[in-house]
Amino acid sequence: MIKLMMCLCRRSDLSRAEFQDYWQNQHGPFFQKNAATMRSKKYVQSHTIDSPLNDGMKQSRGMLPEYDGVAEVWFESEEDLMDAMGSAEMQELSAALLEDEGKFVDHSKSCAFIVREQTF
């Protein structure tokens, strides 16, 4: 299996709470409703919490500010994901997903990449 990771930053006009509310209650259900078209096997949202622990880690390591959240989407294989992305249904859905993400995500400060988990 492979996984799409998206490290998300919110739009500057949204509070973290507004970002997370939209992501969880609007985008999440929209994504899940279309999971079969995308051939996704699992979808997880990890919402960043406001905690002195985050501030301490950032300061002790000289790191950049944390993301507002991380999305993880599992797929059977690269080939399966590429086949899904090539379908007419997915082409239509991709535009709708991007439009919806634009309601809460600042893409210019966010990133996405494909990974394979290594368990120890």
Image (cartoon, grey):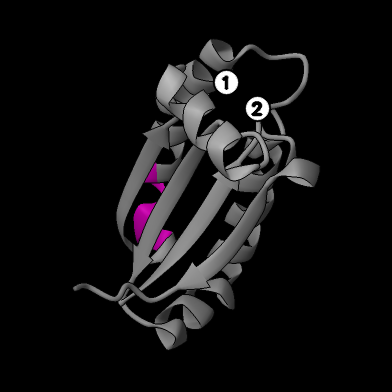
Instruction: Please provide percent x and percent y for residue 16.
Output: 57, 17
Q: Position of residue 63 (x, y in %)?
A: 63, 43
Q: Confirm or deny contact between disc 2 and disc 1 (CB under 8 A).
A: yes
Magenta-highlighted stretch: main secondary structure? helix
- Amino acid at circle 1: Phe
Q: Is residue 21 above or below residue 55?
A: above
Residue located 68% across and 46% down the image: 110
4 is higher (above) or lower (below) than 68: below
Q: Dot 2: within a 10 Å radius of its alpha carbon, few (fewer than 14), some, or many (20 or more) residues?
A: many
Farthest bottom residue in view:
79
Q: Which percent across, then down, holds residue 65?
A: 65, 34
Q: Quadrant of residue 44?
A: top left
Q: Quadrant of the C terminus?
A: bottom left
Q: Residue at x 69, y 51 (%)?
A: 95
Q: Say which quadrant the N terminus sits in.
A: bottom left
Residue 49 lies, in percent from the top left, at 42, 22
Q: Is residue 32 left or right of residue 4?
A: left
The magenta segment is 32-37
Q: Is 13 colored magenta in this rendering?
A: no
> Label 2: which residue?
104
Q: Earlier in the sequence, mark 2 or mark 1?
A: 1
Q: Using residue 112 as the reference point, say whether residue 50 is left or right of it.
A: left
Please name the amino acid that badge 2 sits on: Phe
- Which residue appears at 67% of the width and 40% of the height? 64
The residue lying at 38 percent from left, 76 percent from top is 116
Disc number for residue 19: 1
Judged from this view, the residue extending furthest toward the front is 60
